[in-house]
Image: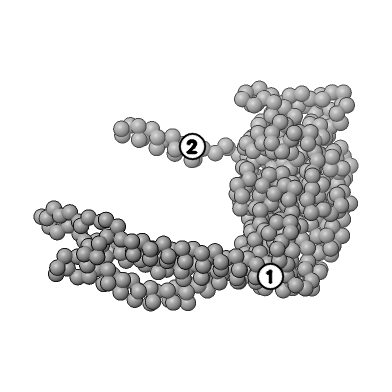
Amino acid sequence: MAVLGALIGLYIGVWVTNFPKAVAAGAAPANSEGANLTLETVASVGSKYSPTHPSWVSYLIRTGGHWVRNTNWSVPANSVVHVTIYQFDTPTGLRNPFLAQVQGTVGGTATLDGKPFQTIEPEEASHTFAIPELGVFVPLAGVPEEAKHPCEEAPCEPSTFDHRTITFSFRTGKKGRYRWQCFVPCGAGWYFGNGGPMQTLGYMDGFVNVV
Amino acid sequence: MSSEARTGPPGEPNHFRRFGTLWIIASLIATPLVVVLLGPSLPPGKGSEQAAGQVTDNTVLLGMATPVLLLVVLYLVYAVINFRQPKGGVLEGPAIRGDARLQTYWIIITSALVLSLAAYGSWRLIEDNGAGSGSGPTPLTKPEGPVMKVQVIAQQWAFTYRWPEYGGVETPHLVLPDNQQVELNVTSLDVIHSFWAIQLGVKADANPQVNNIAFVKPTKLQTFEIRCAELCGIWHGEMFDHGRVVTHSEFETWIHEQQVKFAAATKLLPPYSTTYQPEPKRRGG
């Protein structure tokens, strides 16, 4: 009985304290302050990254020269985070067109394939990068359906497949843990598009740990 | 319970009378104290006419519940003291065979309590234009005088706000002018949420394809907390924000700033409507 109790206690203890390790943002280039986050969004994460859900849409982060499926990131407090997102998925469209405007970034803008933009057409959005508590909302335009070299499965290398490149910067404030999420209903086949990868940590949402 | 059982065997005090007296005295002392001392500090505070009304309602409920609570707790203590098993004795209590008079009193008193609360609640809902709750698309009563419309749009997992009288601009935060009747039109773009402005005493379900109207008149300059009160998915607990009640001039300044800031997004919005049938459906099905 005591052994069983200890095992149950151990299981609960591990379950309660088990939290995915955060991937630290990379250092910014020498000529700028802050940190760098390099991300990609893929239509199918593939069995290499998710044996149980290979068809799920997902974010990946670049760290140590590799793409990693981890949506728990750490960035420095009171600094500027420079974000580059390679977007490989096709458009789904925003349910709320209000989120088609870039909000909360440095200068209130972002760049799409090198060109500054403030809004995109709501139906062209494939995903968003949003940290609601920090007021950051950035729509990510999708790769056209007729793209010649679409990436079917992660990892997707920008040098090989058709993609959109979105860059922007945002300022972090005090230390804390902030959720981030995609606001496009991109969970294919799920109720209102917001199930599956949209409701499971490690795919289309996670935490930004400001440390 | 026969009258013999209630009075007990010869030599035994009349517990019914003794306990009844004790309970009445305790209730007469405790109820006013609870109403006067605890009442003013009950939630949700007095941030709006509706919230102040809810404080009154909660005080009425507490005042009516106090004698009931005392009845239960005092009887428990009384029974432990007076009816415990004597040392060394193994006694059976008197058989209880029903008491029509007691049962009649019980039914009459409890029915009166519940029905009077139901009548009071109904009157308060009508008298206070829904008392801060969602009253559906066609509320039974509406406040008199000018009313400012604000649309509350819920989606997984954030609230945004649309202002039909200010060019249909949408904002990520809620700021309201003080002493202004506000009509909140609450709807959802996906699943069921619930808009809860805690200190303003407003709680209205946000249903897709439904316009749920709640009225509020803020009466205090303050920051108030907004939360979703309907379990709506993984980030339900993170679906919160802070709103502000400001002076009229501060509100005018703020809303005009928002019109400029979100001019680009406003052009992309559909015409203002009480509900929306949002696209896309491709992924969600």
Give the left or right position of residue B87, taking residue B283 as reference. left
Q: Nearer the viewer, residue A128 or B153?
A: B153
What amino acid is labelled 1 in the image?
Pro
Q: Height in image: B220 above or below A134?
A: below
Under circle 1, the secondary element is loop
Chain bearing mark 1: B
Under circle 2, the secondary element is helix
Give the CA distance from mark 2 to mark 1: 44 Å
Give the left or right position of residue A8, taking residue B279 as reference. left
Residue at 31% across / 71% down in the picture? B20
* Residue B250 locus on image (x, y percent): 77, 71
Residue at 51% across / 64% down in the picture? B115
Chain bearing mark 2: A
* Residue A170 locus on image (x, y percent): 75, 49
Same chain for mark 2 and mark 1? The answer is: no
Between disc 2 and disc 1, the foreground one is: 1
Give the position of the N terminus of chain B as an image quadrant: bottom left
Residue furthest left in the image: B88
* Residue B189 locus on image (x, y percent): 74, 46
What amino acid is labelled 2 in the image?
Trp
Q: Answer whether residue A189 is visible to the viewer in this image.
A: yes
Q: Which mark is residue A15?
A: 2
Q: Height in image: B112 above or below A122?
A: below
Residue at 84% across / 40% down in the picture? A123
Give the left or right position of residue B69, taking residue B262 as reference. left
Q: Which mark is residue B218?
A: 1
Q: Nearer the viewer, residue B68 or B14?
A: B14
Query: Within the image, what quadrant is residue B13 found in?
Result: bottom left
